[in-house]
Image (cartoon, grey):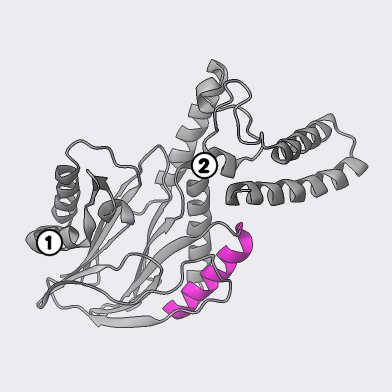
Amino acid sequence: MTTLEIHAREHLLARRAQLVDLTRSRREESLIDLLRRVDAALGALDVGEWGKCSVCHDPISPARLANDPLVTVCLECLSEDDRRALERDLEAAARVQRTLLPAPLLRRDGWEVAFAWDPHGVVSGDHVDILQPRGDGMPLHLLLGDVAGKGVAASYLQSHLHALVRVVAAAECSVAELLARTNRFFCEATPAANYATLVVLRLHPDGRVEFGNAGHPRPLLADARGVRPVEGAGVPLGLFCESTYEVRDLQLKAGETLLLYTDGWTEPERDGKEYGAGRAAAVLSRARDLLLPDLIAACRDDLAEFLRGVPRDDDLTLLAARRV
C-alpha cells in the first residue's frame, strides 16, 4: 500500500467515525449519502481499485486524491458542467491567494524589498509575506516558504501557513520561537505526510538581520566578499512537532543584497541537467547592481534562457532585500 493510500485510509476512517456519530442523531439523507461514498472508497482501497477513474479506469491525479479521497472521476472525464464549476472554483482560489500577497515593492527604514510570485498552475504552494513593523524602530519581517506538493492541495496548506505565521508573529517572540511555534501548530493541524519549508528574516533599521531557516534552500548574499549562500538550516515545518531552530545574525551595509528563492528557480532541468545553485549565484553576481525589480527579472530571464522553451514543472518565487 502506498503512502497516499495509507493516508487516504486514515483520513476516510476518521471521517467515517464522525459521520456515524452524526447520522445517529441526524437522519439527513445528505449525511447518509456521504457515509455511503466513504464506505465505497474504503471498499475500493481494499480491492485495489481506489484512485482509478470510474469512466476511463486510468489513475486519477495524486494531488486531487490527496485533496479529496472521495474523487472517482479524472479531470479528462468530467462533464462539461462539472469542468466549468471546477474552473470557477480554481479561479476563485487564485483570486484569494493573490489578495494575500504583499505589495511587490517596499521601501522602509533603510531597506528595499521586492519579489516575484509565479505559480506553475492556477494556484501555488509557495508562500511569501512581508510583515510591516508595528511601530517606529521595530523590525520588518520577510517570509518565504514552500509547501510540499503542487496544485490545489498545496495552495490550501499555503493559506493555512500564511494564517499561522501571522498569528504567531503577532506575539512578541524571537525568530527561533516564531519558527518553533509555527512548526508545532502546523504539525498538529496537518496530516503527517505534509510539510513545508520556511525562511524568516527580521530586518532591523540599523542593518542587522536575524535569519532563521526551516529546511528551505539557502539564501544568497551579495556583499563585499562576493556572492555566497547563507549557511544554516533546521528541520522543515510539520515533520516533528517539537523541533527547535537556530538563528544567525548578519549585518548588511549599503548596497548589499539578500536573495531568497524557492526550488522552482534552482531545480528545473533540461536534457537531464539542473539549473543549479552555481548558475543562480552567477546571475546574482552579474545583476547585483541593478534595481531590485530588474535584478529579479534578470534571474527569471536567465532561467528561461536555460530552459529554452522547456516548461517549468514547479512554482517559482524570488524575494530580494537590499540595504539602501
Q: Is residue 318 left or right of residue 183?
A: left
Q: Is residue 187 a member of the stretch shown in magenta?
A: yes
Under tag 1, what secondary structure? helix
Question: Which quadrant would residue 208 be assigned to in this image?
Answer: bottom left
Residue at the far top: name it: 80
Q: Quadrant of the C terminus?
A: bottom left
Residue 256 x, y percent position in the rendering: 15, 72
Question: Which quadrant would residue 131 be assigned to in this image?
Answer: bottom left
What residue did someone put label 1 on? 282
Residue type for callout 1: Ala
Determine the residue positioned at 82% across, 49% down: 17
Which stretch appears magenta? 171-191
Under tag 2, what secondary structure? helix
Residue type for callout 2: Ala
Q: CA distance from mark 1 to mark 2?
A: 35 Å
Circle 1 Cα neighbour tier, 10 Å, few/some/many (<14 / 14–19 / ≥20) = some
Residue at the far right: name it: 24
Determine the residue positioned at 20% across, 35% down: 309
Label placed on residue 63? 2
- In the image, residue 221 sits, relative to residue 319, either above or below, namely below
Mark 1 and 2 residues: CB-CB less than 8 Å, in contact? no
